[in-house]
Image (tube, rainbow, N blue to C red):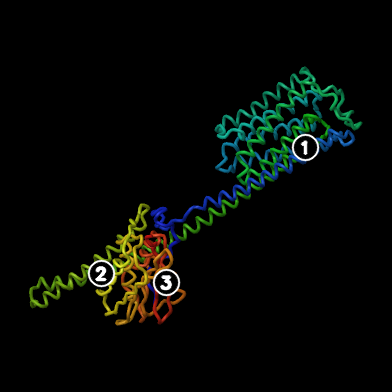
Amino acid sequence: MVREGTTGSREQPWRQSAALSTGRVREPSRVDNRATGQSIARTAWFTLVALGTLVLGWAALIFAFEPVRFAVLAPSAQAGVEAASALARLFGALVLFLFPDDRFRARLGWIGAGLVVLGLGALIYGYLLPLIGDSLDLNTSMYASLVNWSIAGGLFAAGLAPATPPKFSRSAFALSPVLFVALGAVTLAAGHHLPRLVEVEDLEAAAAQGQTPLRGLTGWHWALAAVPLGLALVALAGAVRHLSPARLGTWLVAAMTLLAGSQLHNLFWPSAYSPVLTTANLLRLGFAAVVAVGGVLELRRIAAERAALLAVEREYSGRLEELAALRADFTAMVAHELGSPLAAIRGFADMLAAGELAPEDRRQALAAIRAEVDLLNSLVAEVQAAASVERADFAIHPQPVPISALLAEAAAFARTLPGDHPMQTVVEARGQVWADPERIGQVLRNLLSNAATYSPPGTPIELRALSNGRRIRIEVADQGYGIPPEELERIFEKYHRGRHGRGQRAGGLGLGLYLSRRIVQAHGSDLTVRSQVGAGSVFSFELEAVE
């Protein structure tokens, strides 16, 4: 035997939000989200400290011990570093432009533009020009490097430093390469006329001898090289402040740390688009590698989100199919349930219209018509109640209600049920409970009706009120046919109707237990069932006691 009813998720108490009684899925807990954000932020800070310590320690070691200073003549290696860096930066920019995290879309646009500028600079100055044999003189190469890194640093700082970054538009994106080309052209045309940045005449010869231009740096170099360093530090501070709680913040903080470290090394050991390879070049290669890894991680994030959306879409499609089937079944069920009363009413009405009935038969016919009309009203009331509990504005109105009043009204209703079931009331709890008396009364009537329907005639039904600490447990127990274990959850499904002990499908629309569970959930509890086949069932729920 299976009873009618729906599987509903456990809802919040009515004191928090009655609207949650509609059974909608709740959003993830803010506490859980906060804990996740804090964990990611700690990872970002650990990355910052670890890489910062490495970069600064490396710089201090090179500054203190001249034999470990790193500047070697390696044209092939330098060209390879610039080519690899260019491709990695352009890949990172492509990912950020095509698949931005919606929460940081404006920031990521500026970062992507900065990566485009860096990629173009490395590709043009560091790879293509040496490839065609048109190498730049040292002063021009250093100016081109400073211009390129300053433009990119400004774009990074614009996206990361402000609490609310300026909107990144197509015009802003177009302006970035235009500015790069314009300043680059000026630098290439007038580089040899600009103030000298280093006094070393032949940087390649100095590198071949294991020397670095630390002692030959001019004031112009110190002043101009401080610009990209300052912008990189501003961008790093913005990344730590605004992105560290996000998943992409970890690799962006690492990238900006390496970027700032490379500018620090460049301040003391200049790295330009020349055949000389320095520690600044290696740190910039590390920056590009982190950007490439970050792009891959963002692609994985997008793939995971797309997979999750696809799963949700499939589930949604499945639910739509189930809903369509339920609607078809419901239509057939309503037609069947309405057909019998209407046929009976029509038959009795035809008999009355014929005028051939005796007075006693007329009274019986009218009584039968009234009974069928009551049945129709009951069916309509069930449908209206189901529509009511599924509305977003469904609410209950709890108030202090004496337990004795709830049980007395329910017991009086039980005496009107068919089947001649003896009614027993067990009251072990006194006082009042917080409840909407009309809604809880509806629940008790549904449970008692089910107990009478799914029990043999003459078997007793018990209505109990038991104390459970600060809550009162209300139970409706029968000695009926019982429910098979595999059917215990299905009885709460919408439109599901159980079977009698003889295997026949019960009447009704299968909404009683569905409505009852929703109403109980709106009171901050849940409707549960214990059952044994052949021994009966016990339905129960709890209400908060009034202290």
Between circles 2 and 1, the one closer to the viewer is 1
Asked if residue 179 lies left or right of residue 498, the reply is: right
Q: Position of residue 41 (x, y in %)?
A: 63, 45
Q: Are marks 1 and 3 in contact (CB under 8 Å)?
A: no
Judging by the rendered image, the residue that carries numbered circle 2 is 339
Residue at the spot 73% in from the left edge and 31% down from the top edge: 124
27 to 525, vertically: above or below: above
Q: Residue furthest top?
A: 193
> Which residue is rendered at x = 30% and y = 81% of the image?
457
The three-letter code of the residue at mark 1 reads Leu
Q: Tell me the CA gap for discs 2 and 1.
A: 86 Å
Give the SS element for disc 3: strand
Please report the residue visible at 59 percent of the width from the left and 33 percent of the height from the top.
162
Nearer the N terminus, badge 2 or badge 1?
Answer: 1
Out of 116 and 420, give the one closest to the viewer: 420
Left or right side of 31 for 417: left
Q: Is residue 180 above or below residue 105?
A: above
Three-letter amino acid code at disc 2? Gly
Q: Which mark is residue 56?
A: 1
The percent coordinates of residue 181 (x first, y second) are: 68, 26
Instruction: Using the rendered view, name the quadrant where residue 491 is placed.
Output: bottom left
Of 73 and 131, nearer the camera is 73
- Three-letter code for the amino acid on which mark 3 is drawn: Val
- Which residue position holds label 3? 529
The secondary structure type at the circle numbered 2 is: helix
Q: x, y (%) of residue 385?
A: 31, 60
Left or right of 391 on screen, residue 131 = right
Q: Nearer the viewer, residue 241 or 453?
A: 241
Label 1 element class: helix
Decide: marks 2, 1 in contact (CB < 8 A)? no
Question: Of label 3 and label 2, which has the lower sequence position?
Answer: 2
